[in-house]
Image: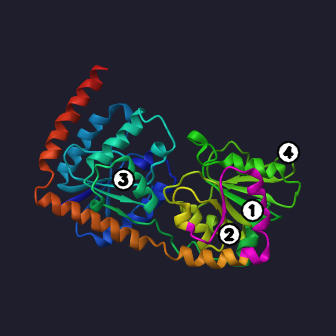
């Protein structure tokens, strides 16, 4: 009896979802009494203790039914009782547990007829159990898919590696700032600045900065698009630095920041927010999606629609008494999120799906599913 995990997301991106799996895979290997086979479609340079990484054909969204057939073949080859995808791929008959990261396309009005989002819908329907990374994501999932059983839809909060994301030595922070030329206080923005339907809401922050006459701070952008030069200056004299950082560098960046600014209109969890709080970095964010749940009373909240509101928050967070309060509450809130607890819930779900497979549950469902998926593949070939 084996567990097959499709590493398809690593082929597509190296962002938050990939970080979730890098943290979780070694823990699952310790917690599960079954071999774990991880399918590498590209983008995987890691070695995970206790996990067999095997090469697998790259994902092409035009040929999803054919991909499902290949996944089923590999599941049968390894005798898999359970299949888990890092994104939204499915086999033909092997029972599946699905991690649901967010309901952004559904909630924010994306074109759900696009093939990738249709595959998400199929993955949700195909899975026998679902684990959501926040209560808000679970609420949205059950709203959009009322046919799902709430009893088989659980929540597991993402975690924080507290050995990395912790308050850092002032000398190390000073050296980090020196290397990047960040001589003045700086605000951080983490992740993509350009997203479909602008749900990351980056423009609100950058437009607010441009209205501020104070030229006594800069902006550090971590990750995301490379449209910003390594170091540039906006029209009002604020330096904007863009850089990619590993976790060690990211923790130092949080440690030196005036605040993390995270004006997102929807998050499934909001990992940068939790990691910033763990490093003693104040957070400015909206109350939308999962952010109110993740930050509780440990962040300065904005509506996500008002530039003057953002400007006021940027000024307020530099008040020593406000900073002290946010840092203290942030540390307490961040302590709730640990990868061990996340992996425990995922392992529990995998064992439940395996037990159902042993009992022959869902066999009729999957046989019918395989027939329909086969038919879809034949239609795709004709098209």
Q: Which residue is mark 3?
A: 142
The answer to whether 237 is drawn above or below residue 70 in the figure is below
Give the CA distance from mark 2 to mark 3. Answer: 33 Å
Q: Secondary structure at mark 3?
A: helix
Q: Secondary structure at mark 4?
A: loop
Query: How far across and how far down the image is residue 106, in percent?
Result: 45, 43
Give the CA distance from mark 3 to mark 4. Answer: 46 Å
Which image quadrant is residue 247 in? bottom right
Query: How far across and how far down the image is residue 222, in percent?
Result: 65, 55
The label on residue 282 is 2
Give the CA distance from mark 2 to mark 4. Answer: 26 Å
Q: Nearer the viewer, residue 152 or 190?
A: 152
Q: Residue at x 27, y 35 (%)?
A: 65
Magenta stretch holds residue 23: no
Q: Which residue is mark 1?
A: 313
Disc on the earlier residue, 3 or 4: 3
């Amino acid at each position: 009896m084996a567990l097959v995990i499709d590493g398809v997301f690593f082929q597509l991106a190296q962002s938050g979802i990939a970080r979730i799996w890098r943290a979780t895979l070694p823990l699952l290997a310790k917690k599960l009494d079954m071999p774990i086979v991880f399918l590498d479609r590209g983008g995987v340079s890691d070695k995970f203790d206790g996990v067999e990484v095997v090469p697998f054909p790259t994902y092409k969204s035009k040929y999803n039914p054919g991909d499902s057939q290949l996944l089923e073949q590999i599941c049968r080859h390894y005798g898999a009782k359970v299949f888990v995808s890092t994104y939204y791929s499915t086999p033909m008959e092997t029972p599946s547990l699905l991690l649901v990261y967010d309901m952004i396309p559904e909630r924010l009005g994306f074109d759900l007829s696009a093939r990738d989002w249709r595959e998400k819908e199929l993955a949700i329907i195909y899975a026998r159990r679902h684990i959501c990374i926040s209560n808000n994501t679970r609420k949205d999932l059950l709203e959009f898919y009322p046919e799902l059983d709430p009893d088989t839809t659980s929540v597991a909060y993402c975690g924080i590696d507290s050995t990395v994301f912790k308050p850092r030595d002032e000398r190390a922070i000073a050296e980090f700032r020196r290397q990047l030329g960040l001589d003045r206080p700086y605000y951080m923005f983490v992740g993509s600045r350009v997203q479909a339907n602008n749900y990351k809401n980056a423009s609100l922050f950058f437009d607010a900065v441009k209205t501020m006459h104070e030229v006594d701070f800069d902006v550090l952008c971590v990750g995301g698009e490379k449209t910003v030069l390594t170091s540039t200056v906006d029209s009002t004299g604020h330096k904007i630095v863009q850089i990619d950082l590993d976790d060690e560098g990211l923790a130092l960046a949080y440690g030196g920041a005036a605040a993390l600014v995270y004006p997102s209109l929807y998050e499934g969890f909001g990992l940068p927010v939790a990691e910033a709080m763990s490093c003693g970095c104040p957070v400015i964010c909206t109350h939308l999606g999962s952010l109110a749940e993740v930050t509780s009373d440990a962040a300065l909240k904005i509506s996500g629609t008002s530039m003057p509101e953002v400007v006021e928050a940027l000024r307020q967070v530099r008040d020593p008494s406000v900073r002290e309060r946010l840092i203290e509450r942030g540390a307490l809130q961040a302590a709730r999120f640990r990868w061990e607890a996340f992996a425990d819930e995922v392992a529990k779900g995998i064992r439940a799906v395996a037990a159902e497979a042993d009992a022959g549950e869902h066999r009729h469902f999957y046989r019918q599913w395989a027939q329909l998926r086969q038919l879809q593949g034949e239609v795709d070939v004709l098209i």
